[in-house]
Image (cartoon, rainbow, N blue to C red):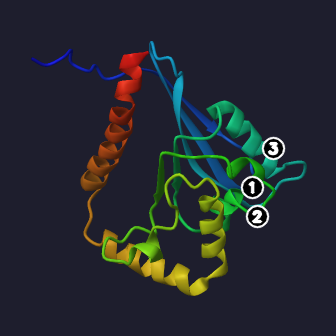
Amino acid sequence: MSGPAIQPPVLAAVRVRMYQVGFGDCFLLSFEYAGQAEPARHILIDFGTRQLAAGLDLADVAGEIDARTGGGPDVVVLSHRHQDHMSGFGGSGTDAVVGRWKPRLVVRSWTEDPAAPADQFNLVPAGDPGSLSAAVRKLADDPALRASLGAAARRRVSGRTWSALTDELLGHYAAVIEADAPARLAA
């Protein structure tokens, strides 16, 4: 005999925050679910700048993200390896906040190559809060590694379609939601 069927959460709202970081990008997507003890799940897409506008401080933005997410985003997406997308993850006065974050999933589009040695491409070990900053610094300091990762990424995506990418992304979201199901049932 099986227990009651697990009902998927009901999405109540999506909030998109676009932070002013000067010449750069930083987006926080918050997904709020009806009737959930934890009010939202958060995805941070990029966090960096090439040039801050006057009066801006990336540490303040990191603090705002930390407060909005209750201690850090659930998912971090690094779209590509440019300073204006990654610099907030290390070396910009944000380490005290960002170094505490423990995202459940880090999507690094240019570092994924299943044929590559694990120590070369799995730059962010799970459960190590300082590893994201260290990995970004490693990439920023090593042009040969960036070139290698770029070539591997181009090989990996050759021939991929938008429908395949969408299916893969939906699979990631389903895995995150499924991992939280026991906690939701207990609440």
* Residue that sits furthest to the bottom in the current view: 144
Label 1 sits on a secondary structure element that is helix
Q: Nearer the N terminus, badge 3 or badge 1?
A: 3
Q: How far separated are the C-alphas under marks 3 and 1?
A: 12 Å
On the image, numbered disc 2 is attached to which residue? 91
Q: From the viewer's perspective, is 122 left or right of 182?
A: right
Alpha carbon distance from label 1 to label 2: 7 Å
Q: Is residue 108 above or below residue 116?
A: above
Few, some or many residues within 10 Å of mark 2 (<14, 14–19, 20+): few
List the residue tagged with mark 3.
60
Q: Nearer the viewer, mark 3 or mark 1?
A: 1
Residue type highlighted by circle 2 = Gly
Residue 121, compared with residue 45, is above or below; it is: below
Amino acid type for the residue under numbered disc 1: Asp
> In this figure, which residue is indicated by the disc labeled 1?
95
Q: Quadrant of residue 49?
A: bottom right
* 127 left or right, relative to 25: left
